[in-house]
């Protein structure tokens, strides 16, 4: 698994390398005689769909409950077991409860906290063509997001029968409510996203300081996904727990489209806001969860001209 700090450093190094490479190339390109570099640093927001969890929960169980002692078994064996071990009633009957219990199941989706969907954004652009109020630029960008979601379930539905088993003859069965079992299940996922993009950007100047722009291009995202599940079902003297974890990494390709407005305070410093949509060609998943990376978002950046 790639170290998270290393991926952040890789993103910055990629941008720096691209700046140096394009700077060298610009000396040989006649069309770029009026070109300039812009570097932007800011914060990005992405609205992701809820994480999807695969069905997971505590296992169902059936058995006989006698004086707070639960013994797992099927209905066929329950009659004879109660006949031999049930609580004696009026010297003539043996009584016990036969329970069918369904363990709690975690919700199949988990919503991300809004605060988790903000991350740092760094980008650079090189203007290779200027004509009147229109300019075209090549862009490169990097964003990082660390997001996590949880889902849970509690309780557990149960049905029960109160059996009085005669010494001779069939058992007498009556419905009863037995508050004996507690059940809980939870699932969680954590996702680190390192998103890179290349684009072609068109800027239209509305004044010396104000312009609008649109940007489109391909993306590649490195996704590091961890997931875990746990569930418990139990009573006073009986309990069963299950759980597991899984992780995976992906490189996911996609496309992005963005549009926004920029304002320059002077020749060197400005601010820009953009709205953006990212389309990913694949989802990321583990054994317990999956995530769609398609998302709407935006970014607010401070931009510097060189």
Image: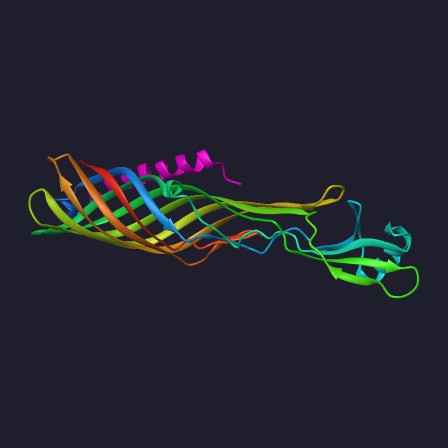
Is 251 in front, or is 275?
275
The residue at the point 36 percent across, 46 percent down is 196
Is residue 250 shown to the viewer in this render? yes
Residue 191 x %, y %: 47, 44
Residue 95 x %, y %: 83, 54
102 sits to left or right of 303:
right
Is 44 in front, or is 59?
59
The residue at the point 40 percent across, 34 percent down is 9
The residue at the point 75 percent across, 61 percent down is 174
Q: What range is drawn magenta here?
A: 1-26
Is 125 in front, or is 289?
289
Render colour scheme = rainbow
| Residue farthest toward the bottom in the current orientation of the protein | 169
| Residue farthest toward the right in the current orientation of the protein | 168
Residue 75 x %, y %: 80, 61
Q: Is residue 275 magenta?
A: no
Q: Is residue 25 magenta?
A: yes
Total marks in image: 0
Q: Overall secondary structure of the magenta stretch?
A: helix
Residue 25 x %, y %: 24, 43
Is residue 27 shown to the viewer in this render? no
- Quarter occupied by the C terminus: top left
46 sits to left or right of 38:
right
| Residue farthest toward the front in the current orientation of the protein | 90
């Amino acid at each position: 698994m790639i170290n998270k700090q290393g991926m952040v450093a890789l993103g910055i190094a990629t941008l720096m390398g691209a700046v140096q490479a394009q700077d060298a190339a610009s000396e040989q390109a006649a069309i770029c005689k009026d070109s300039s570099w812009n570097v932007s640093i800011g914060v990005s927001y992405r609205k992701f769909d809820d994480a999807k969890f695969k069905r997971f929960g505590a296992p169902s169980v059936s058995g006989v409950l006698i004086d707070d002692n639960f013994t797992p078994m099927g209905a066929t064996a329950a009659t004879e077991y109660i006949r031999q071990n049930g609580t004696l009633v009026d010297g003539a009957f043996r009584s016990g409860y036969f329970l069918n219990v369904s363990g709690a199941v975690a919700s199949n989706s988990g919503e991300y906290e809004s605060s988790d969907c903000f991350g740092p954004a760094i980008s650079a652009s090189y203007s290779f063509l200027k004509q009147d109020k229109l300019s075209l630029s090549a862009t490169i960008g990097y964003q990082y997001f660390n997001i996590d979601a949880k889902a849970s379930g509690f309780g557990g539905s149960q049905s029960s029968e109160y059996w009085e088993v005669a010494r001779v003859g069939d058992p007498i069965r009556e419905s009863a409510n037995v508050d004996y079992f507690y059940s809980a299940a939870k699932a969680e996922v954590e996702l680190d996203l390192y998103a890179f993009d290349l684009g072609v950007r068109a800027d239209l100047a509305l004044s010396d300081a104000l312009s609008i722009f649109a940007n489109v291009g391909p993306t590649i995202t490195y996704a590091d996904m961890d997931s875990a599940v746990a569930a418990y079902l139990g009573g006073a003297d009986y309990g069963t727990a299950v759980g597991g974890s899984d992780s995976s990494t992906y490189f996911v390709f996609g496309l992005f489209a963005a549009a926004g407005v920029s304002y320059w305070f002077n020749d060197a410093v400005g601010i820009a806001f953009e709205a953006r949509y990212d389309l990913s060609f694949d989802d990321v998943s583990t054994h317990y969860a999956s995530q769609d990376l398609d998302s709407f978002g935006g970014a607010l950046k401070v931009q510097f001209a060189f």
